[in-house]
Image (cartoon, helix red, strand yellow):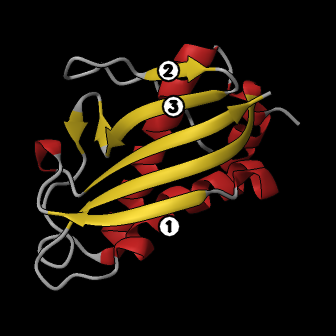
Amino acid sequence: MSVEQRLSELGITIPSAPKPVGAYVPAVVTGSLAFASGQANTVDGKPTITGKLGREISLEQGYDAARLAMINCLAELKAVLGTLDRVKRAVKVTGYVASAEGFVDQPKVINGASELLLEIWGEAGKHARAAIGIAEVPGGCPVEVELIVELQ
């Protein structure tokens, strides 16, 4: 089954790649790896929710924001690769969580991104990961996620 078929089964639509808001490219391919630039929970360049986890944003909202950020990373990869069927496996996810003082559940937030990869690729979606609490994410978003994948 192709990745596009799997996404359709899951009811997930990959949007057009978000336009870079700085001096970077959406993704870089080098050797057998592709690196997707960090993405947040945006639709058409606008945050779907803003704030910090542990204050304005609930764990569930953060999880959903991380999932959307990962969908945006996949959009970047698709734009550069032409198709997500070129992805052999997920290698590494790094997630940044805008956290209020005392918030310590960053891994649970970034599960929104990680579990999406497992839904799509199964075993090949398993990856190394870092979930980091930070003061701010650009645009006031609660999360930013970046992705490294191995290519076929």
- According to the picture, the residue beneath numbered tag 2 turns out to be 28
Residue 34 vs residue 104: left or right?
right
Residue 115 vs residue 69: left or right?
right
Q: Residues within 10 Å of mark 1 (few under 14, many from 20)?
A: some
- Out of 32 and 147, give the one closest to the viewer: 32
- According to the picture, the residue beneath numbered tag 1 turns out to be 111
SS for dot 3? strand
The image position of residue 11, as x and y in percent, is 63, 45
Question: Where on the picture, by quarter, is residue 26?
Answer: top left
- According to the picture, the residue beneath numbered tag 3 turns out to be 35
Q: Amino acid at mark 3?
A: Phe
SS for dot 1? helix
Q: Amino acid at mark 2?
A: Val
SS for dot 2? strand
Q: Residue at x 47, y 32 (%)?
A: 36
Q: Is residue 17 above or below residue 48?
A: above
Q: Residue at x 20, y 23 (%)?
A: 21
Residue 86 vs residue 100: left or right?
right
